[in-house]
């Protein structure tokens, strides 16, 4: 029996999480395992209900389950709140509380979507890289932070242990892939990046079979668009990983395609890389694939059923090959399907 905490969140979160929950239920029926899905409010939805973005009940539930599935949080309704009370601050808090220090963001181009990419077919076809974004340190967490009338300030700090553990995970992953890690930083300008680079190279001595190179983040943004196939594993800091993975989203066709796994030593949370997309929320047009593919990552990393992860990916692939397109991945003038139609088709392709 698996216990999954589902956190729909705000904006399109509930729509895409509903799709992922349908997939979980279908898999439970097909394979005969029990799955208990416990829904909890978080972010703006929780604030509206309880006056708190992250309640202790939601946090405790996340600590007592096999895996957490999260949609997204945030939106215009809550953006005027002071920073520490915003949904985004609660997102940082839940990541920190659950010690989810590694955010794995795979960027894989499905053959059926090559034409949906912002780039030429020959540039994107066969792209398959994995970003290890450090998730509980760096500038999103550094103190002091603040602003007054005349200044705004944030602080970017990395502790040795924070760089060591994400570097190790990325080298381990590279060993199971093409054996190539590119560490992305801004060491030509930032001391914190020079430190990051030194520590990554120290850890690399334990992984001499893995090829390591460094790249500056500005060049990396350009290289991902110019030649995404040169990347196998990317390891980078919180801020740079956040930005670079959205760029990777456009290589695969849409932000609505990229899943992620946020993992630590004890807990794990699965979430699409996109946000709450208030511009399309409530219209049943969001792409649920990133969230459904996050369930595949859940089966791989938390539930120890890689074969089921492959089934989900195959169902997504078959659905795309059959020509179904939500608006974000449709060519101009192409027929589109809704969030629920895309979900139902993926569920059908999973089989009974
Ligand atoms: N993990 C999280 O909870 C995140 C939350 N946010 C929050 O979400 C809110 C909106 O942020 P934005 O900068 O607009 O980023 P966003 O990722 O929500 O949306 C950017 C663009 O991509 C589109 N898009 C995103 N996901 C899509 C999907 N599944 N299907 C089709 N189109 C999709 C949106 O319609 C929008 O045009 C903000 O409050 C932001 O802070 C942003 C990123 C991550
Ligand atoms: C609130 C942000 C840190 C969320 C985000 O953009 C992300 O995790 O990708
Ligand atoms: Mg982001």
Image (cartoon, grey):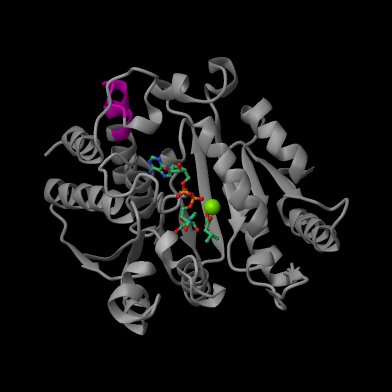
Residue 27 sits above or below residue 345 on the image: below
The residue at 33%/55% (across/down) is 13
Q: Which one is nearer the viewer's eye here, 250 or 97?
A: 250
Pinpoint residue 183: horizontal percent, then vertical percent: 72, 48
Q: Is residue 172 magenta?
A: no
Q: Quadrant of residue 175?
A: top right
Image side of residue 311 versus residue 198, left or right: left
Q: Main secondary structure of the magenta part?
A: helix
Instruction: Decide if residue 27 is in sight here.
Output: yes
> Which quadrant of the rendered structure holds the N terminus?
bottom left
Q: Which residues are magenta?
A: 316-325
Q: Quadrant of residue 332?
A: top left
Percent x, y for residue 144?
A: 72, 78
Q: Residue at x 52, y 21 (%)?
A: 125
Q: Position of residue 21 (x, y in %)?
A: 23, 53
Is 191 left, or right, of 206 in this rendering? right
Residue at image point 88% right, 50% down: 188
């Amino acid at each position: 029996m698996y216990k999954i905490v589902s956190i729909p969140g705000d904006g399109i979160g509930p729509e895409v999480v509903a799709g992922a929950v349908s997939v979980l239920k279908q898999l439970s029926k097909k394979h005969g395992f029990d799955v208990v899905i416990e829904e909890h409010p978080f972010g703006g939805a929780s604030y509206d209900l309880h006056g708190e973005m992250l309640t202790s009940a939601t946090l405790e539930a996340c600590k007592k389950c096999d895996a957490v599935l999260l949609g997204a949080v945030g939106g215009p309704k809550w953006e005027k709140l002071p920073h520490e009370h915003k949904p985004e601050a609660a997102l940082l808090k839940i990541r920190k509380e659950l010690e989810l220090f590694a955010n794995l963001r795979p960027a894989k181009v499905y053959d059926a979507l090559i034409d949906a990419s912002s780039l030429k077919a020959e540039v994107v076809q066969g792209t398959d890289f994995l970003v290890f974004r450090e998730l509980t340190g760096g500038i999103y967490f550094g103190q002091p932070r603040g602003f007054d009338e005349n200044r705004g300030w944030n602080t970017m700090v990395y502790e040795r242990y924070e760089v060591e553990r994400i570097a190790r995970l990325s080298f381990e992953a590279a060993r199971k892939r093409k054996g190539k890690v590119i560490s992305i930083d801004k060491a030509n300008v930032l001391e914190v990046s020079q430190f990051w680079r030194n520590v990554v190279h120290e850890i690399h001595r334990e992984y001499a079979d893995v090829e390591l190179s460094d790249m500056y983040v500005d060049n990396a943004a350009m290289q991902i668009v110019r030649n995404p196939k040169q990347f196998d594993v990317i390891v980078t800091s919180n801020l740079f990983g956040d930005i670079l993975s959205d760029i990777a989203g456009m290589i695969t066709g849409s932000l609505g395609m990229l899943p992620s796994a946020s993992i630590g030593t004890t807990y794990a949370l699965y979430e699409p890389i996109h946000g709450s997309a208030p511009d399309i929320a409530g219209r049943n047009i969001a792409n649920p694939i990133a969230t459904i593919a996050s369930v595949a990552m859940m089966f791989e990393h938390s539930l120890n059923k890689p074969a089921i992860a492959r089934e989900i990916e195959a169902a997504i692939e078959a659905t795309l090959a059959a020509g179904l397109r939500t608006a974000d991945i449709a060519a101009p003038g192409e027929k589109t399907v809704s969030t629920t139609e895309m979900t139902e088709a993926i569920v059908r392709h999973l089989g009974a």
